[in-house]
Image (tube, rainbow, N blue to C red):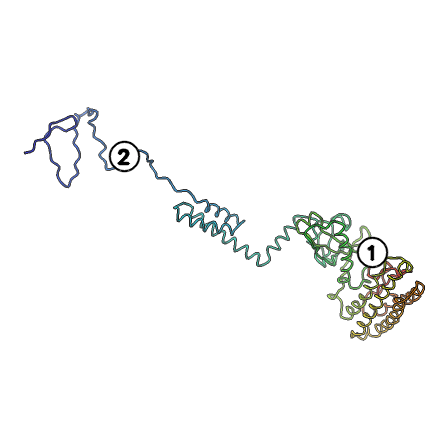
Amino acid sequence: MSIPPPPGPHQPQGPYQPPQSGQPQYPQYPQAPYGQQAPYGQQPPYPGPYQPWGQGYGPYAPQPPVNGLAVASLVLGLLCCLPGVGLVLGLVGLGQIRKRGERGRAMAVTGSVFSALGLALWVLVLATGGAAEFWEGVKEGANDSSSLSLSTGDCFDTPDGTLTGDLVSDVTVVDCGKAHDGEVFATYRLKGSDYPGDDSVGDSADRRCYGLEDGYAMDGWAIPGDVDVYYFTPSQDSWEYGDREVACVFGNTTEGRTLSGSLRNDESVLDNDQVAYLDAAHVLNSALATVPEAEYVEDDLPGYRQWAGRVTTALGKQTAMLRAHGWGPDGKKPVNDLVADLDRARTEWAKAAKATDADTYYAHYDKGSSLLDPKRTVTARKALGLATTPPSSGDGGGGSGSGGSGSGMEV
């Protein structure tokens, strides 16, 4: 027989009840009479199954940090500025997230996808030349003085109708069939990384543009007397943006006057006979243009003798070209008559090249020059359908020069 322990302040009154197996047992507390509160220390605790929070713990567990590479990948991917970098950062960020348990997987995936698309777009642009076109547009827009917008064959107007002074900006390309301020007959690019200076650029344009004139307007006689060569060149500012292009231009020398119709006459608009004649004429005109700078033969007899030798060689080449071409029925006889004059002229120029004094030089030079009088070519030109009005002395053409007494020959 078991004897229950004596009642105490923390034990219930009454007989002891042993616990029954299989059922949870809770301590029994005395119940206060209805309307009265149980004494302090005898109030039962909350009987629920939850345990109170332990000291030092908050109500939620701390969240892991966001991966920094994932954030950077998302930013670069959306901006498309460095797609390759954004793709690499996104892939590396995904690896770090898996290892460290960090957040930002969605950002890393999104950044990688956008970066991959941006990288593919850049590859496509580079492969198709779109990047070059884009950069050209940037350069052209960056400096209004650039001549990059003009191409060979373009006719255009300028804001004030002039082609002189400072670089022309904001030119407007127009139909060559209408009145216009200028016509581009050639373009070329300057070389070098550093700006060579205004004088150097101008000298280059002056030399090259006159040399390129014949390629666009093969028949110098077809160029009106009031038309001259102008050019647009890069400025020091536009050079910094990659502008290297020089535009060679035909323009009217009379202020306020415009051009009418295109001055182009080359293989694209001429027939075979016309091209053959002009090709041969250019050989001679190029040699005539190399006349010495000295005004009189007495001042540079050796230089004039060398010049006469160059003209002699050119005449030989010119006549060979004219004889080799198969001329049509209208042009055959006039061209053969011209070739006979050129042969006689070649003989006189050869003698001038061997002259030992200025008087002898003048004697043969005068005879040779008279046989190269441009008027002697009018019959052949008319038969071939070319211009028949010789340019006056000093008007365009490579034949302008002075051989002692002065010659303005262009055949």
Viewer-proximal residue among 118 and 156? 118
Answer with left or right where residue 390 lies relative to residue 15.
right
Q: Which residue is mark 1?
A: 226
Question: Would residue 64 appear left or right of 237 to someone viewing this image?
Answer: left
| Residue at x 52%, y 56% (from the top left corner) | 120
Q: Residues within 10 Å of mark 1 (few under 14, many from 20)?
A: few
Q: Position of residue 16 (x, y in %)?
A: 10, 32
Horizontal side, residue 305 vs residue 152: left or right: right
Query: Residue placed at 47% from the left, 45% from the top?
Result: 71
| Residue positioned 76% across, 67% down in the render | 270
Give the mark nearer the N terminus: 2 vs 1: 2
Is residue 20 shown left or right of residue 120?
Answer: left
Q: Residue furthest right?
A: 359
* Foreground of the two, 271 or 281: 281
Point out the frontmost of discs 2 and 1.
Answer: 2
Point out which mark residue 52 bears.
2
| In front of the other: 94 or 44 | 94
Query: Which quarter of the figure is the C terminus placed in?
Result: bottom right
Residue 82, placed above or below residue 210? above
Name the element at disc 2: loop
Q: Secondary structure at mark 1?
A: loop
Q: Quadrant of residue 308?
A: bottom right
Q: Could you tell me residue 105's position as x and y percent? A: 42, 48
